Image (spheres, rainbow, N blue to C red):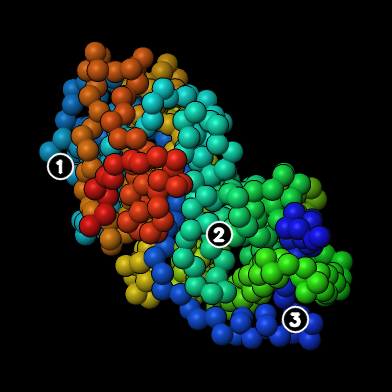
Amino acid sequence: MFNRRQMLKSTLKGASLVALAPSVPGFIASSAEAAAASKDRVLVVLELAGGNDGLNTVIPYADDLYHKARPTLRYQKKDIIRVDDTIGLHPALRPMEKLLQDGHLAIVQGVGYPNPNRSHFESMDIWQSADPRRKTTSGWLGRSLANISVAEGGVPAFYVGTERLPLAMQGPTAGVASLHPAKPFELRLSGREEPEDPFSAKPSASPNTEKAKPASDPDAARRQLIRELTSRAESGTADALQFVRRTSLQTLTTIDRLREIMGNFERPDGTFERRGADFSIVRQGLRYELRLIAAMIRAGIGSRIYYVGLDGFDTHSSQAAEHRQLLETVAEGVSTFFRELAESGDAERVLLMTFSEFGRRVEENGSEGTDHGSGSCLFVAGPKAKGGLIGKHPSLRPGDLEDGDLKYHTDFRQVYATLLDRWLEVDSRRVLDGKFEHVGVLK
């Protein structure tokens, strides 16, 4: 019997089912042509890796204890973006001010989980798996795909980036595609198989470079794939045939649409970088990746979840300049993203959520930076977000701190449950292994 694992093993290690018109079975070709543009709701998750300093992102500027704890890193009332009489945003987030003014930016304060972990890797696993016990080996978004509604011909979820598929997007079913931002046609369908799964996200060339090394005779390999999958499915079970139909259709349709999108997609200017004796143009950056996602959403390719990340938030020293630059990158990327979606009329069906594995300690260290903490903040942005502050800012009084850290009062799984139940319309209890009270991030 040809089971799903064997089928995955026999695939082309990332090759797409493109340029196969003479060889594609009729049921695949006709379904691909009939696939309609989707207008379903979309969730974009933005990972801020390294532990974003929540206290200098959502700033209690009216609290004397804040200024005492941050003598070199503090921001005054005149500096911040005012949210209310006590709370403001970091000045580098100025590009997102219109989202705030329009009521399209929910600011969730005091987010965390029980018994916080200050290890980057372990805490990131907790956020991505939605399991503080670290017993779950799949991701919360990956698990949601088993029950999410997706238009025919659509790949349910995309990871846009150069690294391996994040844990958050790994699950028991295939349905996640990894898209390298600098090589946007190297699509790889991904599931929760072992690390050497041929559907895993593995860049085939140097990250973010303009040109990838061409594969040898890819069309011949693709034709062989179609022949193998089709012949084995026809002689196998109905489940095997259904899997072949779905995977082939998703890949074929999405690749064709991506080619059309990228044909009209103006790439941002790159930067020159020396690689040995050669120079190459490096195309990278959150703003570019979010613009790529916006183009895919506007084209209606049918994906419901997108995942993208920005690294560098582990600011142990000389934090002020570095943190400002990182937040500027976030703000410019997010504001451009929603501006482009608004122009096409798609913004109303998109939400973007940020998260980081932990916050930083209340007191700055001796290197004008901050060390690993716990409770932090996150944003939920979009026209359907309920703008303004969600929850109270954690107290900075010494007796209210937990080992020098902010105490959380909103479990991050409450935010996940809200977005799963009310936005993606997926039963959060099945994804999160329990019921979590919703928070008011949506209108």
Q: Is residue 216 left or right of residue 179?
A: right
Q: Is residue 15 left or right of residue 189?
A: right
Q: Is residue 428 left or right of residue 276?
A: left
Q: Are marks 3 and 1 in contact (CB under 8 Å)?
A: no
Q: Measured from the top left, where is residue 231 in percent x and y? A: 82, 74
Front-most of 273 and 5?
5
Q: Is residue 205 visible?
A: no
Q: Amino acid at mark 3?
A: Val
For label 3, count other residues whose C-alpha is less than 10 Å away and answer few (under 14), some (14-19) or many (20+).
many
Front disc: 3 or 2: 3
Please tell me which of labels 2 and 1 falls first in the chain. 1
Q: Measured from the top left, where is residue 12 in percent x and y? A: 79, 62
Front-most of 210 and 114?
114
Q: What secondary structure is found at the residue carrying circle 1? A: loop
Q: Residue at x 23, y 32 (%)?
A: 393
Front-most of 267 and 179?
179
Q: Could you say which quadrant of the image residue 322 lies in?
A: top left
Q: Is residue 261 above or below residue 67?
A: below
The residue that mark 1 highlights is 84
Q: Amino acid at mark 1?
A: Asp
Q: What secondary structure is found at the residue carrying circle 2? A: strand
The residue that mark 2 highlights is 158
Q: Residue at x 46, y 47 (%)?
A: 431
The residue that mark 3 highlights is 24
Q: Measured from the top left, where is residue 191 in percent x and y? A: 64, 53
Q: Is residue 194 left or right of residue 173?
A: right
Front disc: 2 or 1: 2
Q: Is residue 78 visible?
A: yes
Q: Residue at x 39, y 65 (%)?
A: 41
